[in-house]
């Protein structure tokens, strides 16, 4: 291929989606740190699922679900944080906590939505409640 060759993108929609998610998680970690939180772990995975970010906020341990969208054309990213998703995070948080030697006097689940365009806009919901 010469310098004037037509180089077409070899990325697939799935690859672009993962890249957007990774960018969103990077921005989310930076945002949370600016809010005074300490990032403990990112992308905790086990056979039952994944937690995007685990952080410490004072004495509380915070399990953060991050949703990123390019625009609001499909609605707010926080609309994708469903009751089923929150129940899964609650279950996964229990798995993570059982593996820790440290005691955490408070835990919570936060949701952080990021809309990328025209510039990153953050919507942080603290202590999102899980429907029973």
Image (tube, grey):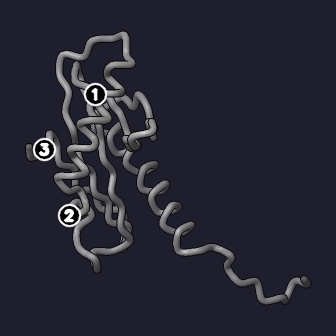
The tag on residue 120 is none
Which of the 4 quarters of the picture holds residue 61?
Answer: top left
Query: On the image, numbered disc 2 is attached to which residue?
Result: 79
Residue closest to the far front = 47
Which callout, 2 or 3, points to the residue nearer the camera? 3
In the foreground, 18 or 30: 18
The residue furthest left is 132
Residue 10 to residue 110: above or below: below
Name the residue: 22% across, 19% down.
Answer: 59
Image coords of residue 62 (percent x, y): 26, 32
Left or right of 13? Residue 119 is left
Density class for disc 1 (Cα within 10 Å; few <14, some 14-19, many ≥20) is few
**Tag 1 or tag 2, which sits nearer the N-term?**
2
Which residue shows up at 46% across the image and 48% down it?
Answer: 26
| Residue 100 percent location from the top left of the image | 37, 16
Q: Which mark is residue 94?
A: 1
Image spot of residue 98 (x, y percent) = 33, 19
Q: CA distance from mark 2 to mark 1?
A: 24 Å
CA separation in Å, label 2 and label 3: 14 Å
Residue 41, given in percent of the width and then of the height, sits at: 43, 31
Q: Which quarter of the image is occupied by the N terminus?
A: bottom right
Mark 3 is surrounded, within 10 Å at the Cα level, by few (under 14), some (14 to 19) or many (20 or more) other residues, namely some
Local secondary structure at mark 2: helix
Residue in the picture at 48% in, 66% down? 17
Q: Secondary structure at mark 3?
A: loop
- Compare residues 119 and 107 and report the one nearer the observer: 107
Question: Would you name the residue on which mark 3 appears?
Answer: 130
Tag 2–tag 3 contact (CB < 8 Å): no
Going by the image, does 5 lie left or right of 63? Answer: right
Q: Circles 3 and 1: CB distance less than 8 Å?
A: no
């Amino acid at each position: 291929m010469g310098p004037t060759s037509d180089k077409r993108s070899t990325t697939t929609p799935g690859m672009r989606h993962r890249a957007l998610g990774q960018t969103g998680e990077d921005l989310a970690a930076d945002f949370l740190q600016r809010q005074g939180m300490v990032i403990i772990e990112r992308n905790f995975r086990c056979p039952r699922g994944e937690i995007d970010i685990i952080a410490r906020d004072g004495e509380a341990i915070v399990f953060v679900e991050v949703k990123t969208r390019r625009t609001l054309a499909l609605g707010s990213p926080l609309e994708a944080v469903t009751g089923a998703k929150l129940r899964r995070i609650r279950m996964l948080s229990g798995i993570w906590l059982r593996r820790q030697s440290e005691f955490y006097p408070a835990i919570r689940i936060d949701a952080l939505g990021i809309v990328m365009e025209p510039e990153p806009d953050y919507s942080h919901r603290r202590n999102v409640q899980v429907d029973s």
